[in-house]
């Protein structure tokens, strides 16, 4: 792939930079090409830090950065939580606090008894280090020494350890020469602090994101940190604003949503559609059964898995999953994937290996330890375990007990000190949940994808059906004081608008927006379904393909 002029400017610059990248602008291509260039000039003991928002995105970035057989050197590819744990807290907190009594495990505040969780009433994700009291530090220390780290406190704990451990700073300075953080619009205060502190070690810092794709404010993330960097004189500011993925009408529609003054691209066709289906979600599923075939033929879509149905809520995804007759696959998140214990990650990767032919067994190993560091006897054991795992997956019926046993064998070899009963329990839960288990399988070429808008972030399809476009649901709003329905309050208009924008820009060829006259609420009751405010915002209907459903 030949870089565009915009991309080339970024690739040629070797300094601190912030890149604002629109959907379809080749962001991942640029990051991976820059990393390839970095690795060519590093020594064996040096590497880059490459932070992605999800494990899946990290794997993709790593594979693309090493696609030509590049040596990853001493690089880190992963999420910010994994970086904070593996590169800062686990190796260096013991210098400040002492050695834990048992192997560290990751837990949640919600898992603590009420009397214990009250000890953390002082905690919030925007707490600056100077606001930490000695009592707060002692509490974090006591948990660490008892072998426990609360997932919510990873960021502030990493900041504290990094700031107070010269050994940690020297290690980071000696090992890493570049730090990349993708999806920076979804950074929290703690990640922003770590990024800035690492930059002060004369490690070149690159932040990449899109202010219009900020969709995780509910978990303490804020686009203001990316915006700060665009105004920071120590960063070179670049834009990747050319969408090379979407049809011009989709670009026009999505940009107009955000700014009615946007310059529209000349196009002969508007390939954004809207329909209001008579009935509820079951009626939508019946409607989709008809439209999927029509769309596939009209848009010359060779494979069904290039079509996706996106929903705002998991409830709608589950209803469509049950009611849709066309072959399909529902993708859902699960606790095993989200759990930060080492064994959980090993089990999750082994499930991907078992179901996905593109996922290599060595990739499972090298996430946690170098292949070259293992003894020959361990390599023989892993080879035998790999064969047994492949045998279990190739059998007509999945032997869950045998699979669990082999997964544990592999985990004991790769990470013998990280044994976690919680991880084993989470694996058992996934193996006994058909929908969660199927999520590890690549979508069959004949299957349409069903997933939430949040889960679709970073993905792309030839055609998408965008559901849940109802008043009160999307954008979400609630009655004001005294249950006043006439003057409702929006929960977060901007975040919901960004999420709508993300959904539409997943489509390469066409996008169909869908509402219905009835909808199911959280209690399972049927309500009247009125169109979302987004459907009629700022006369945007003029940018849609005109059908009988386009009238207000």
Image (cartoon, rainbow, N blue to C red):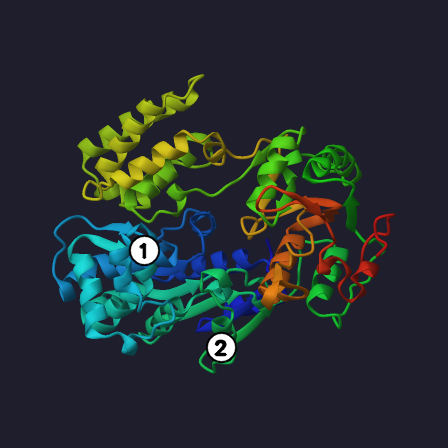
Q: Where is residue 483 in the image (x, y as percent from the top left)?
A: 61, 63
Q: Position of residue 431 (x, y in %)?
A: 40, 30
Residue drawn at (30%, 69%) of the image: 122
Q: Is residue 297 above or below residue 148?
A: above
Residue drawn at (73%, 65%) of the image: 256
Along the line of sight, the residue nearer the viewer: 374 or 530 = 530
Residue 109 is labelled as 1
Q: Where is residue 428 in the image (x, y as percent from the top left)?
A: 35, 32
Q: Can residue 146 be seen in this view?
A: yes
Q: Can residue 39 be seen in this view?
A: no
Q: Quadrant of residue 254?
A: bottom right
Q: In this view, does 498 lie above or below 227?
A: above
| The C terminus - image quarter | bottom right
Give the SS element for disc 1. Answer: helix
Along the line of sight, the residue nearer the viewer: 448 or 285 = 285
Mark 2 and mark 1: Cα distance apart in space: 31 Å
Mark 2, Cα crowd under 10 Å, few <14 / some 14-19 / many 20+, is: few
Q: In which quarter of the image is residue 378?
A: top left
Q: Position of residue 7 (x, y in %)?
A: 58, 64
Q: Which residue lies furthest to the bottom in this view?
A: 233
Classify residue 142 as left or right of residue 399: left
Q: In this view, does 513 lie above or below 484?
A: above
Residue 364 is labelled as none
Along the line of sight, the residue nearer the viewer: 507 or 50 = 507
Nearer mark to the viewer, of 2 and 1: 1
| Residue marked by disc 2 | 228
Q: Which residue lies furthest to the top in this view?
A: 396
CB-based contact (under 8 Å), mark 2 and mark 1: no
| Disc nearer the start of the sequence (2/1) | 1
Tally of numbered discs: 2
Give the SS element for disc 2. Answer: helix
Residue drawn at (78%, 63%) of the image: 265
């Amino acid at each position: 792939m030949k870089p565009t002029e915009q991309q080339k400017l970024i690739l040629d610059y070797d300094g601190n930079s912030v890149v604002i990248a629109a959907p379809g602008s080749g962001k991942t291509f640029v990051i991976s090409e820059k990393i390839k260039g970095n690795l060519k000039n590093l020594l064996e003991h040096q590497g880059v830090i490459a932070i992605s928002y999800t494990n899946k995105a990290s794997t993709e970035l790593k594979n693309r950065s090493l696609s030509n057989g590049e040596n990853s050197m001493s690089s880190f590819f992963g999420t910010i939580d994994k970086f904070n744990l593996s590169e800062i807290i686990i190796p260096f907190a013991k210098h400040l606090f002492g050695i834990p009594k048992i192997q560290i495990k990751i837990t949640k505040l919600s898992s603590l008894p009420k009397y214990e969780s009250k000890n953390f009433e002082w905690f919030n994700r925007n707490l600056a280090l100077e606001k930490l009291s000695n009592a707060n530090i002692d509490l974090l220390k006591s948990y660490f020494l008892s072998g426990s780290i609360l997932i919510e406190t990873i960021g502030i704990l990493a900041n504290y350890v990094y700031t107070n451990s010269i050994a940690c700073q020297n290690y980071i300075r000696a090992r890493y020469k570049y730090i990349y953080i993708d999806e920076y619009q979804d950074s929290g205060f703690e990640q922003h602090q770590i990024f800035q502190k690492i930059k002060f070690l004369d490690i070149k810092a690159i932040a990449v994101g899109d202010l219009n794709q900020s969709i995780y404010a509910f978990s303490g993330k804020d686009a203001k940190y990316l915006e700060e960097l665009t105004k920071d004189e120590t960063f070179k500011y670049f834009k990747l604003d050319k969408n090379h993925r979407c049809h011009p009408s989709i670009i026009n529609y999505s940009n107009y949503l955000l700014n009615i003054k946007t310059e529209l691209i000349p196009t002969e066709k508007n390939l954004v559609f809207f329909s209001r289906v008579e009935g509820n979600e079951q009626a939508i599923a019946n409607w989709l059964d008809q439209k999927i075939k029509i769309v596939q033929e009209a848009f010359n879509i060779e494979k069904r898995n290039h079509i996706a149905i996106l929903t705002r809520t998991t409830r709608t995804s589950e209803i469509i999953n049950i009611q849709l007759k066309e072959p399909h696959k529902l993708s859902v998140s699960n606790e095993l994937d989200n759990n930060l214990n080492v064994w959980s990650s090993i089990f999750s990767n082994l499930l991907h290996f078992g179901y996905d032919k593109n996922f290599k067994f060595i990739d499972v190993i090298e996430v946690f330890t170098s292949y070259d560091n293992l003894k020959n006897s361990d390599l023989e054991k892993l080879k035998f375990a790999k064969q047994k795992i492949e045998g279990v997956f190739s059998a007509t019926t999945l032997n869950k007990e045998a699979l669990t046993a082999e997964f544990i064998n592999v985990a004991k070899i790769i990470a013998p000190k990280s044994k976690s009963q919680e991880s084993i329990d989470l694996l058992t839960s996934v193996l006994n949940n058909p929908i969660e288990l199927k999520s590890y399988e690549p979508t069959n070429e004949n299957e349409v994808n069903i997933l939430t808008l949040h889960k679709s972030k970073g993905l792309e399809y030839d055609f998408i059906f965008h559901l849940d476009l109802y008043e009160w649901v999307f954008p979400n709003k609630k009655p004001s004081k005294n249950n006043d329905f006439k003057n409702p309050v929006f929960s977060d208009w901007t975040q919901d608008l960004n999420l709508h924008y993300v959904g539409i820009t997943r489509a390469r060829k066409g996008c169909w927006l869908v509402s219905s006259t009835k909808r199911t609420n959280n209690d399972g009751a049927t309500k009247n379904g009125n169109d979302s405010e987004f459907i009629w915002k700022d006369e945007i209907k003029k940018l849609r393909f005109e059908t009988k459903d386009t009238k207000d």
